[in-house]
Amino acid sequence: MQQNQNDKLMEKLVSLCKRRGFIFQSSEIYGGINSCWDYGPLGVELKKNIKEFWWKHMVSWRDDVEGLDASILMHPRVWEASGHLDSFTDAMVDCKQCKLRFRADMVQGTRCPECGGELTEARQFNLMFKTHTGPVEEDASIVYLRPETAQGIYVNFLNVQKPSRQKIPFGIAQIGKAFRNEITPGNFIFRTREFEQMEMQYFVKPGEDEKWLEYWKNQRKSWYDLLGIRGEKRRFHQHSPKELAHYAKAAFDIEYEFPFGWQELEGIHNRTDFDLKRHNQFSGKDLSYFDEGTRERFIPFIIETSAGVDRTLLTCLVDGYTEEEVKDETRIVLKLAPHIAPIKVAVFPLVKRDGMPEMARNIQAALRPKMPVFYDESGAIGRRYRRQDEVGTPFCLTVDSQTLEDQTVTVRERNSMEQVRVNLDKLISYLENRLQIQISI
Ligand code: GAP
């Protein structure tokens, strides 16, 4: 019963995303391509707001983290050094009968979960996408689409540290696409083959790594608090020795309770000096750091925070989606935190006459330089409110006959549906306060 409702919730979300222009299946007119998704007008705004908020929290509001935008294609030796060529694999099994392929840890027993056919022995399957640079497809021209953004940071450690004159401890942050040829993608945008990551690598003195791991766990927890994701739906999961990635000494996932169960939202890892040591060794370039205070030279340890943009966006949608009964009708509300909502304010003339549309257009023009604002004059006012509730717009303003007399508008708040009249000359500051605009701009 509960499972049924959870499946329905995902179906409703996928349908809302399509209907209202958040997310569409990629290449839909050709029948779509498995696990690839396109972000439409509202999806792209929401995604941008999430990324900007991450960037503010992790880079702009701090002195000790610098930004980077490294290229997706890197020297193939990077992936030898990082261990991805050897170890970035999933064990998979094939069904001998229906030919479907599964991750070995996802099937129980030796029979195919789809048709009951016999399964092959498990084989290792590398998750990196391969391609070629230049006109000749030969082994020497093989390159990989990066499976994580982190390596672009490690190989640029000194390139960033020197001009920025950062001293350890300090971090480098990056947002960008990553690609993994996942055997079992699914659950909408939860696990896809092309996705975006928001990663930060914090370089610390060996011996201080455990302290900084705790520090970053707390920082990341507060980011999700500010993002408005319910605390009771989140938890930390500590990796057991068996779960630890090849590079990690300790790792915590921030997990969220999705309709399909508790799943990883972000990984926070103590990567030790593994990455820099390996790049040091494979490139032959000295990547050690000289501490002028203590006159010591060492390879820093790295604490990593690694979040998925698409997974965070899905979390915001799942966490915010609510259905309420109002006057015998179901009201769908996307309770997004105001500072990430794609549209901040919608402006409506009550009717399409008596100067109300002109007045509403003037208000829209005054708000536009400050916040994303949407104008709508079509349909009954109740329907216009519902349309905005469904996409998470925190405020709707209605211009009515009183507006023309006393220069006040009705401001309706999305969650409570409460309405207050606000004077036009106080409107911008009223909205900026209530929209947490200080963290959104
Ligand atoms: N650099 C470390 C690293 O990449 P990870 O746990 O493999 O660690 C970090 O990935 C985050 O990237 C995950 O917590 C998730 O949010 C996101 N992610 C990973 N694989 C993904 C996929 N196939 N689709 C969408 N997001 C993914």
Image (tube, rainbow, N blue to C red):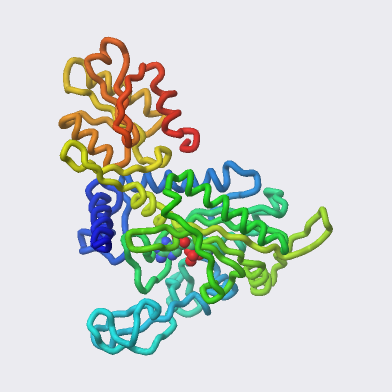
Image label count:
0
> Residue 16 in the image: x percent, y percent?
25, 49
Q: Residue furthest front?
A: 1
Q: Is residue 373 visible?
A: no
Q: Is residue 28 visible?
A: yes
Please indicate whether residue 403 sits to the left or right of residue 303 in the image. left
Whether residue 60 is situated above or below residue 305 in the rendered picture: above
Q: Residue furthest top?
A: 405
Whether residue 50 is situated above or below residue 396 in the rendered picture: below
> Residue 355 in the image: x percent, y percent?
21, 16
Q: Residue at image x 23%, y 37%? A: 386
Quadrant including the N terminus: bottom left
Q: Can you tell which quarter of the image residue 91 is in?
A: bottom left
Q: Can you tell which quarter of the image residue 305 is in?
A: bottom right
Give 31 or 400, whichever is nearer the viewer.
Answer: 400
Please indicate whether residue 314 sits to the left or right of residue 174 in the image. left
> Residue 419 in the image: x percent, y percent?
30, 26
Q: Residue at image x 39%, y 71%? A: 182
Give 210 or 95, whichever is nearer the viewer.
Answer: 210
> Residue 356 in the image: x percent, y percent?
22, 19
Q: Residue at image x 57%, y 71%? A: 82
Give 190 or 38, whichever is nearer the viewer.
Answer: 190
Please indicate whether residue 178 sits to the left or right of residue 38 in the image. right
Q: Residue at image x 42%, y 68%? A: 180
Whether residue 266 is situated above or below residue 42 in the rendered picture: below
Give 402 or 416, whichever is nearer the viewer.
Answer: 416
